[in-house]
Each structure stands twice: as structure tokens, then as C-alpha cells.
């Protein structure tokens, strides 16, 4: 009996942290599940502290405890002031890559208008980057800051296929620009620099050559200044289409009217059959 008691005590000791972990999200959501829960910020703005339970549980972090990310939470919560979430605790490699990127530089200059982990991936609804759900929203996510590039992307074959809901084998923003270590085109280490753009194209196009890699993927047919060739090509093609339809539509309408009038005339004045020839012998 003594050995059995020691066994059960040990088992309980091992399982107790798991039980506490399992209950912690529910404990937090007992307050943060309230849509009216808010916090007044120093700049006079109000921040919502509401967490949608369904989004959190279906996220990639849904099996983690809240304090895995919010490490500053203590027993005195909500009186304590937890610091900013550090994604680098689990994602050290991605964080180091991000620090080298143009996004990190922009964030240091103006955090309110530049992306960090939370702005791109979300907070409590983070999805796997390879999931269809994340892929279908990725271009729109980038488009919040890069609206012009989003528009020109959807003008391409790749973008049109993605807009129809098909993301398999279709390149998204990070496939060309990389996901975290995004560098400007002038940087030789950038995936889209003149030194490395061909290697980037070769990932999907094994037969690509230097000429192929010079194609402007974000050509803007609406801007004469940025892309005069695409602009004039599009302009001429639109003129041809309007000219063709401008002739075809009235021609078709007039032909229909003429056909209708002739049929009506035939009904009013049916033609008589020619008299049969009388037979005669020589």
C-alpha cells in the first residue's frame, strides 16, 4: 500500500502542471472573453483586450498556455503590467532574419506605420504560413502597406489564379521577396536584386534564363511614367477592342432590323409558286 501511495503521489505531481496548463486559457478567457474589456492607453486611445476563443483555439498557438507568450503575467495580474510579447523566444531564427530586413529598419523609425510580427501574422489567430487559410489572405496582408504592388500582382497570371482561390504552385509575395529577411532591390543580398533574381526565378521556372529574369513582374499598365511600354500596349489594345465593338454592335443591330423587316414583308406578301409547265409533244 505504501508503494502504491508513493506511485499515485508521484503521478499526481507529474500531471498537476498539465492540469494547470489545460485550465489556464479558460481562466484567462473568463475575463478576456468579454468583448467590453478594454484598456486606456497613455496617448488617450483605447485598446481592446478581448480574445475570441474560437480563433485562439484554432490558431497555431491554440495548444499553448497564455503565459508561453505573455511571460510577464504574474499572480498579481491584472495589477501587473506585462511587457510586449517576444516572438523570438520560440522563433529565434525568424527574428534574427527580420532584424536584417527593411521592415525592421522602418519599424525602428516609425513603429506605428511599419510591420512587425504581430502586424503580419496577427495576435491570437496566427495561422500556419503553409496553410490554405493563411495563403489566401497573405497578399491582402502585404497589400495593406503595398497597395500598388498588390494591384499589379493581381494583373498577372499568378495573381489572377490566386484571386480565384487556387494557391497551389502559385508564387505569393514571400516566394520572391522572402518571408522575413526582406531587403531592397538595390541590396545584392536581396532575392530580387540583379545578382540573385535569376536564382529566385529558377525555384519555379527551371528553364529560366537571364532574359526571362528581366521581366517586370509588377508592370503597371496604368502608369505611363513607371511603365510606358505596358501603358501604350494596354491603351492601343483597349482602343482596338472599343473600335471593333463600336462597329460590330451597330452592324449587328442593323442587320437584325433588316432581317426582321424582310421576314415581316414576306409574311404579308407571300410569293406565289410559278405555274407548272404544260406538257406538249412535237
Image (spheres, grey):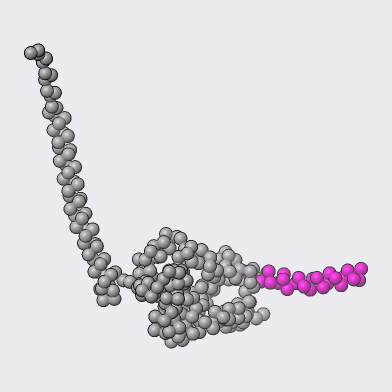
Q: Residue lying furthest right in this view?
A: 1
Choose between 141 and 223: the one closer to the eye: 223
Q: Position of residue 73 (x, y in %)?
A: 63, 80
Q: Magenta span covers which residues?
A: 1-25
For residue 23, above or below residue 280: below
Residue 85, image x, y percentages: 57, 80
- Is residue 45 visible in this depiction of the protein? no
Kindly report the secondary structure that dominates the magenta region of the rendered protein.
helix
Q: Looking at the rendering, in which quadrant would you find the N terminus?
A: bottom right
Answer with left or right where residue 266 lies relative to residue 208: left
Residue at left 13%, top 33%?
265
| Residue 8 lies within the magenta run | yes
Q: Is residue 8 left or right of residue 221?
A: right
Asked if 107 appears above or below 32 in the picture, the reply is below
Q: Please identify the residue farthest to the front as the structure is shown.
A: 282
Q: Residue placed at 42% from the left, 84% from the top?
A: 187
Amino acid at each position: 500500500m505504501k508503494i502504491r501511495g508513493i506511485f499515485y503521489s508521484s503521478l499526481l505531481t507529474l500531471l498537476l502542471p498539465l492540469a494547470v496548463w489545460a485550465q489556464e486559457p479558460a481562466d484567462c478567457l473568463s475575463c478576456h472573453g468579454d468583448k467590453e474589456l478594454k484598456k486606456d492607453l497613455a496617448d488617450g486611445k483605447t485598446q481592446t483586450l478581448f480574445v475570441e476563443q474560437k480563433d485562439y483555439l484554432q490558431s497555431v498557438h491554440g495548444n499553448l498556455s497564455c503565459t508561453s507568450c505573455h511571460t510577464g503575467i504574474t499572480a498579481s495580474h491584472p495589477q501587473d503590467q506585462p511587457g510586449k510579447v517576444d516572438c523570438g523566444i520560440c522563433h529565434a531564427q525568424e527574428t534574427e532574419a527580420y532584424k536584417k530586413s527593411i521592415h525592421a529598419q522602418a519599424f525602428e523609425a516609425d513603429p506605428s506605420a511599419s510591420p512587425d510580427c504581430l502586424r503580419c501574422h496577427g495576435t491570437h489567430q496566427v495561422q500556419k504560413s503553409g496553410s490554405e487559410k493563411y495563403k489566401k489572405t497573405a497578399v491582402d496582408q502585404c497589400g495593406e502597406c503595398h497597395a500598388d504592388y498588390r494591384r499589379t500582382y493581381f494583373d498577372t497570371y499568378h495573381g489572377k489564379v490566386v484571386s480565384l482561390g487556387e494557391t497551389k504552385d502559385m508564387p505569393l509575395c514571400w516566394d520572391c521577396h522572402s518571408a522575413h529577411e526582406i531587403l531592397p532591390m538595390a541590396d545584392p543580398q536581396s532575392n530580387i536584386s540583379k545578382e540573385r533574381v535569376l536564382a529566385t526565378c529558377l525555384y519555379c521556372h527551371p528553364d529560366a534564363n537571364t532574359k526571362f529574369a528581366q521581366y517586370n513582374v509588377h508592370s503597371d499598365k496604368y502608369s505611363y511614367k513607371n511603365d510606358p511600354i505596358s501603358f501604350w500596349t494596354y491603351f492601343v489594345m483597349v482602343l482596338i477592342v472599343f473600335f471593333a465593338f463600336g462597329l460590330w454592335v451597330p452592324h449587328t443591330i442593323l442587320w437584325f432590323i433588316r432581317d426582321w423587316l424582310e421576314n415581316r414583308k414576306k409574311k404579308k406578301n407571300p410569293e406565289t409558286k410559278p405555274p407548272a409547265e404544260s406538257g406538249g409533244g412535237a
